[in-house]
């Protein structure tokens, strides 16, 4: 679901945040699975996704375009 900018309510971003578990990583991609179980394990390219800092539970927040989550079967 697109997010609205507080500074400009007319602007809609196609970025989506999801809780994920990091299973593996390479210099070019992350192998992830969703925390909520909404999709299969999938590789996300670092060039298209941003992995936040680890949470206390060891999980992460992944920010990526909505189309990429759809492509991976997560939406």
Image (cartoon, rainbow, N blue to C red):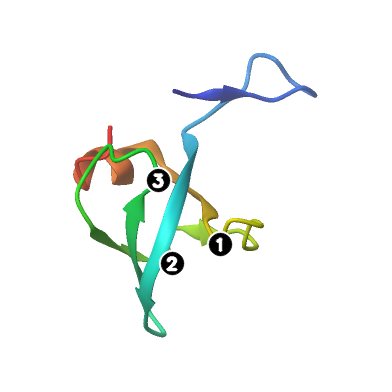
Q: Position of residue 13 (x, y in %)?
A: 54, 31
Q: What is the crowding at mark 3: few (fewer than 14 residues within 10 Å), some, or many (at least 20)?
A: some
Residue toward you, 18 or 65: 18
Mark number for residue 35? 3
Q: Is residue 22 visible?
A: yes
Q: Is residue 39 left or right of residue 55?
A: left
Select label 3 or label 2 by which is in front: 3
Residue that numbered label 1 is attached to? 58
Q: CA distance from mark 3 to mark 2?
A: 22 Å
Q: CA distance from mark 3 to mark 1?
A: 11 Å
Residue occupying the point 61% across, 59% down: 52
Quadrant of the rendering where the C terminus is positioned: top left
Q: Which sits earlier in the primary sequence, circle 3 or circle 2?
A: 3
Select label 1 or label 2 by which is in front: 1
- Above or below — where is 74 with respect to 63? above
Q: Which sits earlier in the primary sequence, circle 3 or circle 1?
A: 3
Q: Secondary structure at mark 2?
A: loop
- In terms of image quadrants, where is residue 58? bottom right
Residue toward you, 72 or 57: 57
């Amino acid at each position: 679901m697109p997010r609205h900018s507080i500074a400009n309510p007319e602007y809609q971003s196609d970025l989506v945040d999801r809780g994920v578990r990091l299973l593996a990583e390479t210099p070019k991609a992350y192998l992830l699975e969703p925390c909520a179980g909404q999709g299969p394990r999938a590789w996300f390219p670092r060039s298209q996704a941003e992995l936040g800092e680890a949470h206390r539970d060891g999980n992460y927040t992944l920010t990526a375009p909505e189309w990429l989550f759809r492509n991976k079967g997560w939406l």
